[in-house]
Amino acid sequence: MSVTHVFKVVDGLSLEIDVLSPPTKDENSPVLLHFHGGFLFIGEKTTFPPHWLINACKKRGWTYATASYRLLPETPGLEILQDAIDAVNWVHANISKRVIIAGSSAGGYLALAATAHPATPRPLALLSIYGMMDSSSERYIHPGQPLVAPVDDEAQTLKDVEAAMQDDAIDGYPFPMNPPADRRFGWIRVLHQAAQYPDVLARKPGLAGRIASEGVGAVSVEDRVLFPVKFGLNQDFPPTILVHGDADELVGFDQSVAVAGALEALGVDVSFERAEGQGHGFEAKGVIDLDGDEEVGDKAVTDPLRRVIAHLERHVQ
């Protein structure tokens, strides 16, 4: 049974966390806390739930939780990250001190950034599912690379994003049925096309351009927590599991490749599962039960997911 709790009240919003505890839960069982995707601009805590992960948690007696957080561009990135940190701390204080921090797409970024932050209790493991990990990487600092399709009126759409920064905070936006036609999805597209995603994330106009010309040293000390791949990884980083489709056109496969390589170089326990031929959201298109008696689904999808669960089991032991 799922129970909803308020873990934080801020900006007039009650940020909630849904907690699904299995019948076999014991006092020392772990909890997996998942953050939803949507480029930090769209989505809700129940957007594209990872049924394969929820089912796996239930079968193993683990608690599954999913938390809301405020969204860009109304809320600055530092405050969004604080929401994620506060959610982890709430879980740590109220459910279990044995926590796995997980996330999909932009939620994978939040999971990584929260894990790297000194205010977050060390988790058992970090799980990133096709994470959008590093907005200081080449994709996000050089203009002229549209997402899905070009935005025709780039200048006006950028003004719309800037105006929205003054609006009241929101903690969810239903995933659009037709993303290319959605105004808010247009904001995501224009920030990719104009290479201004880091600017909006950090609320520092021109930041992406400065990173492109000067390197990541252009990022201020206070904003470095928003760029954990560049500033937050170390040899004491928790065990990390990444899974990513190598045909992902929304969040490049290279995002996970870079994180895996950086952590491996530090000697961190890293497990990187490549889903061959799979695109973004490859495992969220249906209900997958990896523990079922019958073999169902595409093995290119289910095999890497089974290996992810095996890695999680190893870290929970």
Image: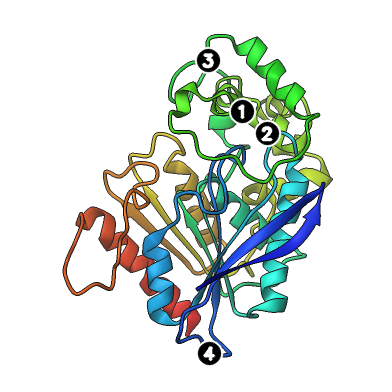
4 or 3: tag closer to the N-terminus:
4
- Please name which of the two marks, 2 or 4, marks the residue nearer to the observer: 4
The residue tagged with tag 1: helix, strand or loop?
helix
The residue tagged with tag 3: helix, strand or loop?
loop
- How many neighbours does mark 1 have within 10 angstroms: few (below 14), some (14-19), or many (20 or more)? many
Residue type pointed to by label 1: Ile
1 or 3: tag closer to the N-terminus:
1
Residue type pointed to by label 2: Pro
1 or 2: tag closer to the N-terminus:
1
Distance from disc 1 to disc 3, alpha carbons, whole Å, reads 17 Å
- Please name which of the two marks, 1 or 3, marks the residue nearer to the observer: 3
2 or 3: tag closer to the N-terminus:
3
Label 4: which residue?
26
Residue 206 in sight here: no
Q: Residue 151, which numbered label?
A: 3
Distance from disc 2 to disc 3, alpha carbons, whole Å, reads 18 Å
Q: Quadrant of residue 154?
A: top right
